[in-house]
């Protein structure tokens, strides 16, 4: 249930029990530098409510995250001189989520930075795509 998941290190950071390098804070969100950055300026944007996965985030909190991500990214680019950035958001261990508290990575990108990801795309069968889209539309929340 939203807000009921168990406490993580991010809750301790939000409550000020563990230090962080804060870059932004308001009533709903805390953003701070990742302690093990993939690039200079790698920042975590963390909703203050204790929820494990994106699909369980209350809509008003999700809207606030969406409102703030762009402005925070703009400030990171201005401060670091990076040219672009990736937003990464992991849900579930299988997707690489280590901390079970929703968070968004802002990862600044520079030419030749050597960062990347496997994107093993293959052409799909059109009928299989149509069937799958139908199943997703029909699925319940
Ligand atoms: P994820 O794999 O999406 O759960 O990412 C968790 C991120 O949290 C990793 O990039 C860690 O480096 C970062 N992290 C863990 N502990 C801390 C901490 N105390 N302060 C800042 N970042 C942290």
Image: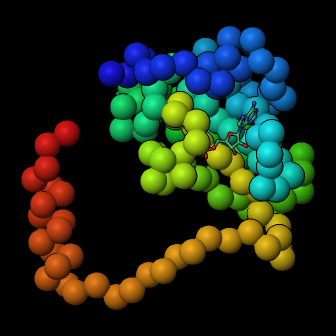
Question: Can residue 60 be spotted in the picture?
Answer: no
Q: Nearer the viewer, residue 81 or 108?
A: 108
**Which quadrant would the N terminus be assigned to in this image?**
top left
Q: Position of residue 102 (x, y in %)?
A: 52, 34
- Residue at screen point 54% across, 45% down: 97
Residue 80, placed above or below residue 60 = below
Query: Which is more toward the observer, 120 or 63?
Result: 120
Q: Which residue in the rendered view is the most extreme toward the right? A: 80
Residue 136: quadrant of the picture: bottom left
Q: Position of residue 125 (x, y in %)?
A: 22, 86
Residue drawn at x 62%, y 19% is 11
x, y (%) of residue 76?
A: 80, 45
At horizontal 84% and vertical 76% (from top left) the residue drawn is: 112
Q: Is residue 131 left or right of residue 107?
A: left
Display coloring = rainbow
Vertical placement of 81 versus 120: above or below?
above
Rendered view: 108 above or below 104: below
At 41% from the left edge and 30% from the top edge, which residue is drawn? 57
> In the rendered picture of this protein, how many numbered marks are placed on residues?
0
Which x, y percent locates residue 52? 46, 31
Of the four image quadrants, the one with ligand 1 is: top right
Residue 139 appearing in the image: yes
Position of residue 130 in the picture relative to residue 47 (left or right): left
* Image quadrant where one finds the C terminus: top left
Task: Please give left or right for residue 54 compared with residue 32 in the image.
Answer: left
């Amino acid at each position: 249930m939203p807000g009921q998941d168990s406490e993580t290190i991010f809750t301790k950071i939000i409550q000020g029990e563990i230090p962080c390098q804060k870059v932004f804070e308001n009533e709903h969100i805390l953003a701070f530098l990742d302690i093990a950055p993939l690039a200079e300026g790698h920042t975590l944007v963390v909703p203050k409510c204790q929820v494990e996965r994106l699909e369980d985030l209350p809509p008003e909190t999700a809207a606030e995250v969406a409102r703030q991500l762009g402005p925070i990214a703009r400030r990171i680019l201005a401060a670091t001189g990076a040219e672009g950035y990736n937003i990464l958001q992991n849900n579930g261990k299988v997707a690489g989520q280590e901390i079970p508290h929703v968070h968004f990575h802002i990862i600044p990108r520079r030419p030749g930075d050597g960062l990347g990801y496997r994107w093993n795309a293959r052409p799909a069968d059109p009928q299989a795509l149509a069937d799958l889209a139908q199943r997703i539309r029909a699925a319940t929340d």
